[in-house]
Image (cartoon, rainbow, N blue to C red):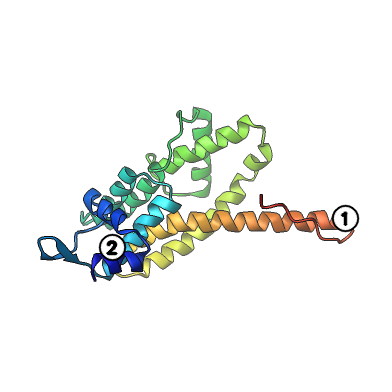
Amino acid sequence: MRMAELSARSGVPAATIRYYLREGLLAAGQLTSPNQAVYDDSHVRRLRLVRALLDVGGLSIEAAKGVIAAMEAKSGNEFAVLGQVQYGLTTGRKPSAKEPPAQALDRVDDLIARRGWRVRENNPARSSLASALATLQGVGREELLAALDDYAAAAEGLARREVEELLALEGEDVRAEAVIAATVLGDAVLSALRRLAQESALAGRFSQHAGGGSPKAPSAG
């Protein structure tokens, strides 16, 4: 397919596709003349993946390039490659302004040990979680801190299913793409489901207090 069709099928403007080509986020097409190239379905799939990284994952161009590079690495150690992809998805987002306090990191390490998780110390999610816990403590939300094991149990159940589905896939590239989808889009799905469930739970409690009537829906604007 030509650039125009690639743009139409992917939903990405041609000018943006050319930018991704220059930045190395998208592999070059097959040249048919000095100024013309053709593309295939792999380019459509990669464009959708890049848009997921940038639009849903909130990564910068540089961070997305790092994730793509890790995904394409052929080190012979697939576990390390998949780990680099996942770590890049965490560090590519807006970093915390400061390091989390030691007490919060200790709390995270205690959780990891308690649940028997095999996690490397340099996993960026360790610091992300510690920062979140420190902030929760700072704003006095101790009830959420007390529910940490419940959050962990839910995450563990999801992770086990995701890993089983990941290992059922064939091909290192396909698995790396699946890690990106499960992390970036899975985070978005989980966040949206949680907010829907929160509204439903609140509506149920308020309707009980109001004698069974339906609570007024919140305004959209």
In the image, residue 18 sits, relative to residue 134, either above or below, namely below
**Residue in the picture at 61% in, 30% down:** 138
Crowding at dot 1, Cα within 10 Å, few <14 / some 14-19 / many 20+, comes out as few
For residue 83, side relative to residue 151 (left or right): left
For residue 33, side relative to residue 44 (left or right): left
**Residue in the picture at 45% in, 29% down:** 99
For residue 215, side relative to residue 172 (left or right): right
Q: Quadrant of residue 167?
A: bottom left
> Which label's residue is closer to the chain start, 1 or 2?
2
**Residue in the picture at 59% in, 47% down:** 149
**Residue in the picture at 10% in, 65% down:** 33
- Mark seen at residue 130: none
Instruction: State the residue position of label 1.
Output: 210
Image x and y of residue 22, in percent:
22, 50
For residue 127, side relative to residue 218 (left or right): left
Image x and y of residue 221, in percent:
66, 49
Is residue 144 or residue 77 the one in the foreground?
Answer: 144
Q: Quadrant of residue 142?
A: top right
Pointers 1 and 2 in contact (C-beta within 8 Å): no
Q: Residue furthest right?
A: 211
**Badge 2 amino acid:** Asp
SS of the residue under disc 1: loop
**Badge 1 amino acid:** Ala
Where is the N terminus found, in terms of image quarters?
A: bottom left
Image x and y of residue 87, in percent:
37, 46
Instruction: State the residue position of label 2.
Output: 173
Does the image show residue 16?
yes
